Image: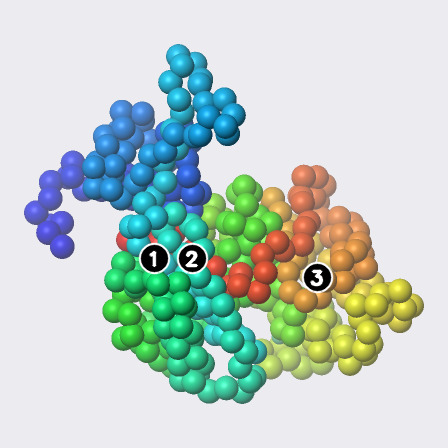
Amino acid sequence: MGKETAGPLKLLRETHEQRVIAALRTQGALTRAQLAEQTRLSRATLSVIIQSLLARQAVTESFPDETDGPVVRGRGRPVSRLTLNAAGGLALGLDLGHRRIQVTIANVAHEIVASDSVPCAERTPWPRRVKLALDLVDELTSRHELSLGTLAGVGVGMVGPVPTGRNLVLSGRPAEVRDAVSERFGVPVQLDNNTRLAALAEALWGAGAGFGSALYLRLSYGVGGGLVLGGRLLAGATGAAGELGHISVDRDGPECPCGGRGCLERYVALATLLERCGNLLEAQSPQAHDLLTEAGTRIGEVLAAACNTLNPEVVIIGGELADTGDHLLDPLNATLRRYTHAQVHKNLKVTRAALGADAAARGGIALVLTSPN
Ligand SMILES: [Zn+2]
């Protein structure tokens, strides 16, 4: 709006401002020095932008309480931290999962202001799932006295593939869901697969916080994953990047609904493992121990190939199967290290996911907060 008439200098400043806002959105509170480092802008440029943001109350500046520790540095000036103004807007994350509908609401300062879920039967039709989510939004906003008048956007996680590549037009079920949500709130709605959104939230705010690149693998009734580089979810050409569950581990193995054969998911999906051993979590039984060793080894092989390709800083293991702990992770780690290049596994951290069942909804919020508009 009106950008056509703006001169090149104005446009340049807006782009720089977007970098500052994006850094605060993704990192939370930052000092000016940290902002300069994150945005690679000069102190002078940054100073002009911060003054403008403060004047518009898009950003607030706070000085640490003296009880927080030393506040004086160098020439004795206290170091302030800048945050996006919490009253400046809300972001809504919805996760339309197989068995659960999750709704989480955060403000632009990254604070979660409301979150809850309702169960839903596995074959619940999509319009009904959307209705359950929207009803829960109404319930939460009234319970917490929130106004969605300042809603910045909605991020929605769905099961199944969601085409998210550049220039792709949504159709079918994802388009219907997007239209229903967008009609209700009148703000931009972004969609992605819910496992990939969990990957994004884990990388930004969970076990991957502080790492530049994270590979996330979710081991549940399905097996999926996502790769987050520099705070952004890698989409690939069609939004299918990170489908680690459909890497074949046996070309003569059982057929998979994806069209392949012997996919990792056929061997380590929770239902398959539970069929073979009902008490998986009681891994003191030799049968469960053997099964988890076998599963961990297969997963480690697939992760080794992925890590040799992507060289991530951290591998995050999520989903219910991760609750079996070291019984799964020890063989997984050993195999991963055995089949990766030394340079790849030298500093590689393998860790369990840190966020809970709301990870995908929080990933939806991350989509809103990190979108460049
Ligand atoms: Zn498959």
In this view, the residue in front, 273 or 122, is 122
Image position of 57 (left or right of 350): left
| Disc 1 element | strand
Q: Residue 91 appears at what percent x and percent y?
A: 36, 59
Can you tell which of label 3 and label 2 is closer to the viewer?
2
Amino acid on which disc 1 is placed: Leu
Query: Would you identify the image quadrant in which residue 191 lies?
Result: bottom left
Can you tell which of label 2 and label 1 is closer to the viewer?
2
In this view, the residue in front, 140 or 197, is 140
Q: Residue at x 54, y 78 (%)?
A: 119
Inter-mark Cα distance, 2 to 1:
9 Å
The N terminus sits in image quarter:
bottom left
Q: Is residue 340 above or below residue 104?
A: above
Q: Where does label 1 land, which residue?
A: 90
| Disc 3 element | helix
Instruction: Say whether residue 57 is visible.
Output: yes
